[in-house]
Image (cartoon, rainbow, N blue to C red):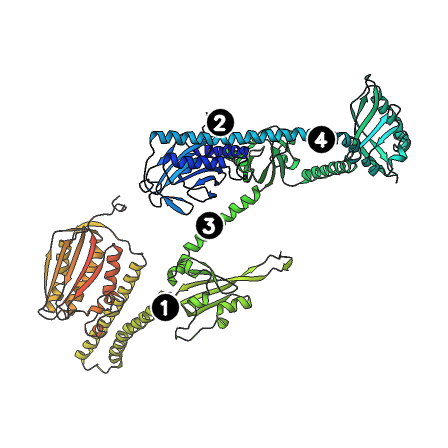
Amino acid sequence: MKFKTMSQRSLEDDALRVEAVEKYEVLTTPVDPALSDLARLTTQVCNTPIAAVMLLDGDRMVFKATVGISVAEQPRGDSPCERTVTQQEVYEVADAYLDPEHSERGIELGGRIFRYYAGAPLITPTGTVIGTVFVLDSVPRKLTASQRDALTIIGRQIITRLELNSRVRQMELAARVHQRTDTALTVERNFVSAVLDTVGALVAVFDTAGRIVRFNRACETISGYKSSELLGRYVWEQLIPSEDVPEAMREFEGIRTGGYPVTFENIWLTRTGSPRRISWSATALLDAQKQVAFIISTGIDVTVQRDAEATLRESEARYRELIEGSLGMVCTHDATGVLLSVNQHGAEAIGRTVDEVVGHSLLDLMFPGTEKLFAQYLDQIARTGQAEGLLHLRHLNGELRVIAFRNKLISVPERQPYVLGFGVDVSDKIRAEGELRSLVRQSNSILESIGDGILGVDLEGCITVMNPAAAQMLGYEPAEVLGKSMHDLIHHHHPSGQHYSWETCPVNLSLRKMETTRVSTEVFWRKDGTFFPVDYVARPQVDTDARTVDGERIPGGRAVGVVVAFTDTTQRRALDRMKDEFISTVSHELRTPLTSLRASLGLIQSGALSTKPERTRQMLDIAIGNTDRLVALVNDILDLERINSGKTELNYSMFGIDELLRKAAATQRTQAARADIEIQVEAQQVDAWADPDRVSQTINNLISNAIKFSPKGGRIVFKASRTENDEVQIEVQDSGPGIPEDKLEQIFERFHQVDASDSRSRGGTGLGLAICRSIVEQHGGRIWATSKPDEGSSFFFTLPSRPSDSDTSLI
């Protein structure tokens, strides 16, 4: 069982009310004194100052009788009357201020506010509530049981009055109808004689011999003849073409001998000789003896209609030819999806013939896995009358064919509705779009993975593309720059602060000259106002395909934008500076001992010291010392390069750091003793997972530095412990002059010493700490230094205490 909703019942009740009120014909009539008397009686019975009789008319309330208030009508709204008409008994609001429906404003009528309401529904004999009789008061109150009964009775009396008035009007109407009928019969007798001349159809009356006895005005208009010219003459003498006369006579004879009624078509020749096709319905008029007395024929001129039908048939033939010649799919199907027709191209698109698909459901032709879309499609067609989208069909060879369709539900009177569909095979297009999306994703992946910044710029100089590397270097989010001028954002000034005009910008010149431009002496500006040096290449994007837009031929080979690829050269330039400094330092470090070596050997070779053997030995000692210094420098450089290039393999093993420190201390004690420096080892017993030879090299470098920079009587302390991160930490503490805080990071760079004179006064190549850092970082550790002026320095580095999960060197 299907239940009606509240809104459906309300609409049906309103329709019944409107119909019932219209039947009483009371809305537009003058005030009925009887209804006014009943309204006054209501105020007396209920002891209230206000009473009214209200009828509902669509969206308004019409007051047919009122006492104590003047109001003719009012729009329907949130009124107690609305609740009264939904009930079968008296509805009462004792105090509107206490009623949740009216507590804020009371009951409003005629511009006045009331607190009390009681109303009885006006119920017709058929049970339809058409209004209320109600009372109002400005003070709270409540009806007695007898007053409620009286109010209900008055409501019935109002309906009785309306019924009485309705019946009186019906009786008066019946009397008038009877009078009109008598008059109409008289008129009819006169009308029948004139109808043949005024009717729009052709009417001709013939006697049994075929002579014309009546020829109405429509016949005169079509034929061009006056009735006086044809009366008494045979129809085939004047109006029927000679070749059609035998057929016309046979038809007439058939009617005369009882073959009636009959319909047929024939040709009439007009006075001007033009043919007119007439469609006839003919029958016989019988006399009292049931014999044929006359033959009456009524007809219409169907010349235009038949011409239109012929034109329509021709149009249908052209349409059919157009459909069959279409390169798309054109089909019809019923409401369940069964194909009624399809053009040949549409059938061939899925590898089938027309006969193989007509009569089959579209569901049978859908590609596996897409069948669930079929029910959604039919539902949309049924709800909206149209649908468009993609239909996934299975080709006879198993391939997927995608049809872009736009279908419409066609409803024809006295026929089952059907769906007319138009579709285009877009399988190749979708495949190409998929490949294009793949290429776009690939291009985007390439753009995202490239370390260089990439910017796409249109002809107006506005940014259209920015890859992540460019966004990171420039400090912008892509959304902040897209559509904005590249030059104004990142290329507006020279490093000196001088304005950089767009007209002289190499990117603009690349577009104008249609040539690739390479620049390596400029800067780009970041979002935060800082700049960085860049090398960039600007290459125009050229559209090689010619096309037609809005009828205008646009040739190929024109620029559509420019791609700017740039690299932040800050690090490279820093490396260049480091290289220059390295070459300068190495040159100095080589030149100084070589100069001394050359001078010493030159003095010996010249014979100037042949008589001074002691002096000769000094020169030889100087030569040997400088030679050792050169060898140490070359060895340190080679060690550093091998470590940094990854050519030095680490031979990991587990060993005790405390034991390694004691061996290193023993090795260096002789050198420390010469400098009057004490070495102490305060190491815990901890093991490290590392290359012991490389760790020894690091410790020896740190000890050598500590001995060089510690004063006589100084002390060097070795410490080793395990950290919270389960690493081994080694510390070498000296009592030297200390290191300024701003130099604590720089001392680990190549050839960097706190004081440039240290390399001359204390010896060394300036590469020892750089080698230490490379060895420690190769182990995955860290190295750093702490220091206070005149209180010495401490050097720390960490090593792993055990193999990592991915370490396979033990296998």
Question: Of the residues under marks 3 and 4, which one precedes in the sequence?
Answer: 4
Front: mark 2 or 1? 2
Question: Of the residues under marks 2 and 3, which one precedes in the sequence?
Answer: 2
Apparent side of residue 207 relative to residue 793 in the rendered image (left or right) = right
- SS at circle 1: loop
Q: Which quadrant of the structure image shows residue 208?
A: top right
State whether residue 540 appears in this view: yes
- SS at circle 2: loop
Front: mark 4 or 1? 4
Front: mark 3 or 4? 4
Q: Quadrant of the C terminus?
A: top left
Q: Which residue is mark 1?
A: 529
Q: Position of residue 187 (x, y in %)?
A: 74, 32
Q: Which residue: 26% across, 57% down?
A: 777
Sort mark 3 into few (<14), some (14-19) or many (20+) by Cα contacts within 10 Å. Answer: few
In the picture, the disc for residue 184 is: 4
Question: Of the residues under marks 4 and 1, which one precedes in the sequence?
Answer: 4
Q: Which residue is mark 3?
A: 441
Specify the amino acid type for callout 4: Ala
Q: Which residue is mark 2?
A: 125
226 and 57: which is toward the camera = 57
717 and 477: which is toward the camera = 477
Sort mark 4 into few (<14), some (14-19) or many (20+) by Cα contacts within 10 Å. Answer: some
Q: Which quadrant of the structure image shows residue 640?
A: bottom left
192 and 37: which is toward the camera = 37
Front: mark 3 or 1? 1
Apparent side of residue 645 relative to residue 768 in the rendered image (left or right) = right
724 and 261: which is toward the camera = 261
